[in-house]
Image (spheres, grey):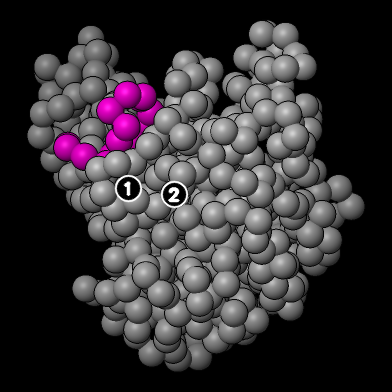
Amino acid sequence: MKWLSFPGKMKIKSIALIVLTLFLSQAYANKKIEQKNLKPRIVVLTDIAPNNIEPDDMESIIRLLVHADQFEIEALIATTGWSNTGNGERIDLIHDALNAYEKDLPNLMKRSNQQKIANDESKQEIGYWPSIDYLKSRTVLGSTKMGMKIIGEGNDSDGSNLIISMADENDERPIWISVWGGGNTFAQAIWRVQQERSPEELKAFLHKFRIYTITDQDRPWSQGDTINYASSSHQWMRKLDKDLLFFWDECAWKHQNSTGVNNWKEYALHIQNHGALGALYPKYKWGVEGDTPAFMHLMPNGLSNPEIPNQASWSGYFEYGLGRDSLTYCYTNYTGEPYAIGTKYFNYFYPAIFNNFAARMDWAKEGKGNRNPVVIVNGKAGIDQLTIEKKSGKKVLLDASKSFDLEGDQLSFNWWVQPEAGSYKEDLSIQTISQGKASINLPSDSAGKTIHVICEVTDNGDPSLTSYRRIIIKSKE
């Protein structure tokens, strides 16, 4: 695979290029292209365990922290799960990762030209690196027992209480519960609200959340056909109306695990021993970073809207359907066509995902490195999806030539259609006009349909990095 071969460090740029880079950096700072949007809110439920038991949660938490400028990490909650079945939750391991983050933070802040920590960190903009005090204040213990049987009186925890308090904050952004182990801490929060609030208040509470689980880990591990899903709080939550609780259950963790193992030499070379976080990054035991897909779909890179699971993201592709228990429904991709489509996109995006990680570990280690290109389509900057309305039979012009790179790297452009996301299902071709410019002819039979076009911009830095912009074309009569 091409991404596995990283070029050597780039030669020192000429004075002219340095001046250009400084100019672009200032333009970037003035436009605040990335910083104008608030981060997605995320809560992590992790069954983090010692390396000799299962190191993948530690790997994933390091990946998360080196992207902490992209996510508003509302809580890091130690819970039960397949790596920790109860009464041994290792919140101290989360603190180990945070201590490493604290050491690397001055270098990481240079990536965003951040000079100081904000007085108020309650609503963070994309590009802002949170303080160690903020993250430690949001690190708590969740449920110490596993399964649906313990949901109820006597099972409240600092984790479930914190989740309830977050829902009561004056913040319209959804809260994503990223479940790396068992989700019964969140289930307990739901139960508590059921007991103490009205049905309308419960509905408002549930509407605040979206839950993404790395399979169903609120039950003992089983490789046979005797899995008792009814013992899990996950099934109980999946039984809630989908209009009340947005529930994802997926298989991308298997892809991440095996692909990471097959390419471990790249992790050893570009991730381990890069800064304090890299020094803490352990070698796999079973698989690499099995929990990372639980937050990659939230990456604010312009590729997808996480509220729409069939928009391909860095976590793959999902459709609403019957879950593994053959009883409850959720957004999933564990079998059939959703599995095939999800696998296709996971494999396609994996090189860009890894390079993004590797570049950030360079910043952690050296306080310098490559940054992602800034994508501008038809004169519009930002990461929000761009909607274009055009009559069928007409030509749509797409212009990303104003996109730029902070390091002054050369950019390459790739335009492609994601057919699963749009309502027009026939084959379409995109014509390249020139560097960064393309067009698409709307077929006469496309009236009333939508077409999803992805603008993919990649630099030639070390490592090369990719940014995106999704354009939704609405074809009219």
Q: Please tell me whether residue 11 is drawn above or below residue 422 in the rendered image.
A: below
State the image quarter where residue 385 is shown. Answer: top left
Q: Position of residue 279 (x, y in %)?
A: 59, 84
List the residue tagged with mark 2.
Answer: 220
Taking depth in this image into account, of 204 and 38 the one nearest to the observer is 204
Quarter holding the N terminus is bottom left
Q: Position of residue 303 (x, y in %)?
A: 40, 45
Residue 321 is left or right of residue 427, and the answer is: right
Mark sitting on residue 367: none
Sooner in the amino-acid sequence: mark 2 or mark 1: 2
Segment colored magenta: 324-337
List the residue tagged with mark 1.
Answer: 251
Q: Amino acid at mark 1?
A: Cys
Q: Residue at the spot x=54%, y=33% of the render?
A: 148
Q: Nearer the viewer, mark 2 or mark 1?
A: 2
Q: Residue at the spot x=32%, y=73% of the render?
A: 261
Is residue 205 located in the magenta-colored stretch of the structure? no
Q: Secondary structure at mark 2?
A: loop
Q: Position of residue 427 (x, y in %)?
A: 10, 34
Q: Secondary structure at mark 1?
A: loop
10 Å crowding of disc 1: few (<14), some (14-19), many (20+):
many
Q: Please tell me whether residue 161 is drawn above or below residue 17 in the rendered image.
A: above
